[in-house]
Image (cartoon, grey):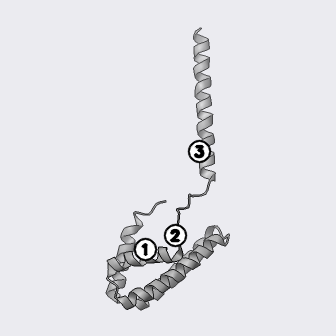
């Protein structure tokens, strides 16, 4: 009787372990979930509104930053759907980010740009992985 109980318990533990490993494998093979996104204009407006609250954009700056932001959001979306992967994609995203920062630096005052960089650094710790 003892042998039967011990054997049943061992089989149950082995079965649970097999299912746990299988679930873990399928979870790591699936791509990261994509958040629902609005239109380019909506996303740009949200982003520029947050930026405006941080750096106090003038109406003229707001318009210019909105155009730059819409342009780069569209370029990032196109890059995501292009099929690039790995280091190639990272390099392209990094190049886009540098171009965007260069254009923003030309629009913003030095004090505004410093506040923007500080806000972005503070936000880095809050990004989902």
Tell me, yes or no, if residue 94 can be seen here: no
Q: Decide: few, some or many residues near mark 3? Use Cα within 10 Å; few <14, some 14-19, many ≥20.
A: few
Nearest the eye: 98 or 49: 49
User: Which quadrant: the N terminus?
Assistant: top right
SS under mark 1:
helix
Residue 37 tag number: none
SS under mark 3:
helix
Q: Quadrant of residue 88?
A: bottom right
- The residue singled out by tag 2 in the image is 38
- The residue singled out by tag 3 in the image is 24
Q: Nearer the viewer, mark 3 or mark 1?
A: 1
Residue 37 locus on image (x, y percent): 52, 67
Pointers 2 and 1 in contact (C-beta within 8 Å): yes
Pointers 3 and 2 in contact (C-beta within 8 Å): no
2 or 1: tag closer to the N-terminus: 2
The relative height of residue 106 versus residue 101 in the rendered view (above or below) is below
Residue 27 locus on image (x, y percent): 59, 49
Residue 73 locus on image (x, y percent): 53, 77
Left or right side of 47 for 57: left
Could you tell me how far apart the alpha carbons at marks 3 and 1 are, in whole angstroms?
Answer: 36 Å
- The residue singled out by tag 1 in the image is 46
Q: Decide: few, some or many residues near mark 2? Use Cα within 10 Å; few <14, some 14-19, many ≥20.
A: few
Could you tell me how far apart the alpha carbons at marks 3 and 2 are, in whole angstroms?
Answer: 32 Å
Rendered residue at 58%/17% (across/down): 6
Nearest the eye: 47 or 32: 47
SS under mark 2:
loop
Could you tell me how far apart the alpha carbons at marks 2 and 1 are, in whole angstroms?
Answer: 10 Å
Rendered residue at 61%/40% (across/down): 21
3 or 1: tag closer to the N-terminus: 3
3 or 2: tag closer to the N-terminus: 3
Residue 114 locus on image (x, y percent): 34, 82
């Amino acid at each position: 009787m003892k042998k039967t109980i011990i054997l049943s318990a061992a089989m149950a533990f082995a079965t649970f372990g097999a299912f746990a490993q299988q679930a873990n494998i399928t979870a790591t093979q699936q791509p990261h979930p994509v958040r629902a996104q609005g239109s380019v204009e909506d996303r740009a407006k949200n982003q520029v509104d947050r930026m405006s609250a941080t750096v106090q954009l003038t109406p003229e700056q707001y318009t210019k930053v909105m155009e730059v932001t819409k342009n780069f959001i569209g370029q990032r979306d196109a890059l995501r759907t292009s099929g690039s992967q790995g280091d190639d994609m990272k390099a392209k995203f990094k190049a886009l980010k540098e171009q965007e920062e260069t254009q923003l630096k030309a629009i913003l005052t030095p004090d505004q740009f410093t506040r923007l960089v500080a806000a972005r650094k503070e936000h880095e710790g809050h990004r989902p992985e």
